[in-house]
Amino acid sequence: MIGRVSGEPVKVLVAEDEAPQRAALLSMLAEAWPDLADVTACEDGVAALQAVAERRPDVAFLDIRMPGVSGLDVARAVVASGGLVVFTTAYDQYAIGAFEAGAVDYLLKPVQPARLARAVERLRERLAQPSQDDLQSRVDELEARLRPRGDRLIRWISASAGDSVRMIGIDEVLFFQARDKYVQVVTVDGEAVIRTPLKELLAGLDPEVFWQVHRGVIVRVAAIERVYKDELGKWRLCLRGRGDELPVSAAFLHRFRGM
């Protein structure tokens, strides 16, 4: 663990997009961890990333599937700041093997008080005696196991370009950017628009090839040349051999460690 001083109150983040489930988890957590005083609750992944950047939680309970940004992306930010992660998931029992193999804790929905109590006990132990586990690689391993495969990955996009429909291979795409009610698809040869929301696109894109870097931007990693802070203090990225400059949210900067 890094960034936490012994004796300080434990800071906890709870991210769950379903209000009843979020309320139930917060209520059970209050019973299982009665001396916990610093809890931040978020209803989507974007808000959770902002909370991680601002609060640097010691522990995060994260729903895997949330609007805007997945729990796996939030987990990377939590781990990068030295925190621990517990995933909450509605995946069936067969898929739970992915979480167990990933060596991260999880709570199967609907969360049961006894199971939460065991998770809290383990968290207390780990907070008291921080380990040197490479949690970042364990999150990566979990994502690899849960990643869309085969025909679940997007291969082609049917997009509008003026008065025609253009078939775009996913290997041609440089970035996607939300534009009002549409999403702009930009390739080396031009651009087109689609109606599919970014959050639905993310579910079918290979996360090793495409990164979400802003609430409204998904970019091909190999196309990124550099990331910089402009004169207004805003983070932006440049694409190789192009004049495009795309916004980068501070909450997504953890993706660029070492770039």
Image: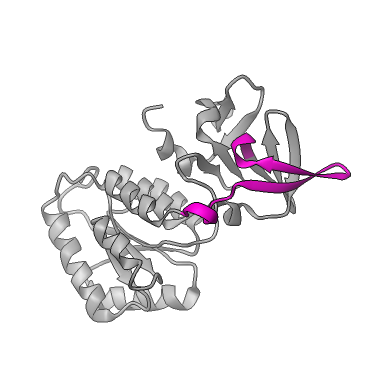
Boundaries of the magenta span: 148-175
Place of residue 153 in the rendered image (x, y in percent of width and height, measured from the top left) = 54, 51
**Left or right of residue 92: residue 228:** right
Place of residue 169 in the rendered image (x, y in percent of width and height, measured from the top left) = 65, 40
**Left or right of residue 221: residue 198:** right
Q: Residue at x 75, y 45 (%)?
A: 193
**Left or right of residue 188: residue 238:** left
**Left or right of residue 100: residue 218:** right
Residue 201 is inside the magenta segment: no
The answer to whether residue 173 is seen in the rendering is: no
Does 140 appear above or below 171?
A: below
Q: Give the camera-side residue of 106 and 47.
A: 106
Count of number-bearing discs: 0
Among all residues in the image, which is located at the extreme right?
163
Q: Give the camera-side residue of 106 and 151.
A: 151
- The quarter of the rendered structure image containing the C terminus is top left
The answer to whether residue 217 is seen in the rendering is: yes
Q: Which corner quadrant of the image does residue 29 belong to?
A: bottom left
Place of residue 55 in the rendered image (x, y in percent of width and height, measured from the top left) = 37, 51
Q: Residue at x 41, y 72 (%)?
A: 90
Q: Residue at x 25, y 47 (%)?
A: 135
Q: Give the camera-side residue of 34 and 153.
A: 153
Place of residue 16 in the rendered image (x, y in percent of width and height, measured from the top left) = 44, 67
Does 125 appear above or below 207?
A: below
Q: Residue at x 31, y 49 (%)?
A: 141
Among all residues in the image, which is located at the extreme front?
150
Does 230 appear above or below 122?
A: above
